[in-house]
Amino acid sequence: MKSVESTMSQEIGELLQGQTLILCHTYSKSLGKVISTALSWVFAIDNKTVRFAVDCKSKIVEAVQNHSEITLSFVGGESVYSLSGPSKVKVEKTQDLTLKMAIIEIEVEDLRDITFYGAKITQEPKFIKTYKESLIKKLDDEVKETVFSL
């Protein structure tokens, strides 16, 4: 995919199911610059919608409220992708989760393979969550259920 797409393929949707390292970039009006954060709880809801969870105190929440354009970058399928579109805060602060999270939704407008010419990614980034195994499952399940229930 070297062209610009406005919907996600099944392959991209499968990458965005809460276990891929995602980099999030948006403009912070209060800081006057682009800010970035790393995410894992990012989910493709359908081929036009992505939702993610972030700490409710994150600067990303304020940035989205003031400037809706957002970009996610991620590696998968031997390529690097950029997914952009308008976003909105769906939930400012969750009440029933162990962690107080904000849920942000993106309408996919621009999806592109941004891998530089002549390259393919041979190894995807891997990460481990370093807290208790029982807490990992609990938090993953809570966040996923909340993100998909909206």
Image: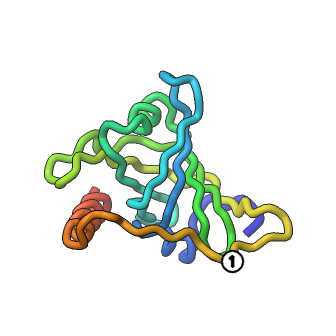
> Which residue, given by chain and number where applicable, does mark 1 sit on?
122
Q: Which residue: 54% across, 53% down?
A: 23
Give the quarter of the figure containing the N terminus: bottom right
For the residue pair 124 and 148, the one nearer the viewer reads as 124
Location of residue 121 by image quarter: bottom right
Q: Does 139 sit left or right of 41 as displayed?
A: left
Residue 9 screen position, x and y as percent: 58, 72
Q: Which residue: 56% across, 76% down?
A: 11
Residue 75 screen position, x and y as percent: 61, 66
Give the quarter of the figure containing the C terminus: bottom left
Q: Does 32 sit left or right of 54 as displayed?
A: right
Q: Where 65 sits versus 80, above or below? A: above
Q: Which residue: 45% across, 64% down?
A: 44
Q: Which residue: 32% across, 37% down?
A: 57
Q: How is the image coloured?
A: rainbow
Location of residue 60 by image quarter: top left
For the residue pair 129 and 147, the one nearer the viewer reads as 129
Q: Amino acid at mark 1?
A: Thr
Residue 116 screen position, x and y as percent: 80, 61
Identify the secondary structure beneath mark 1: loop
Q: Where 115 sits versus 110, above or below? A: below
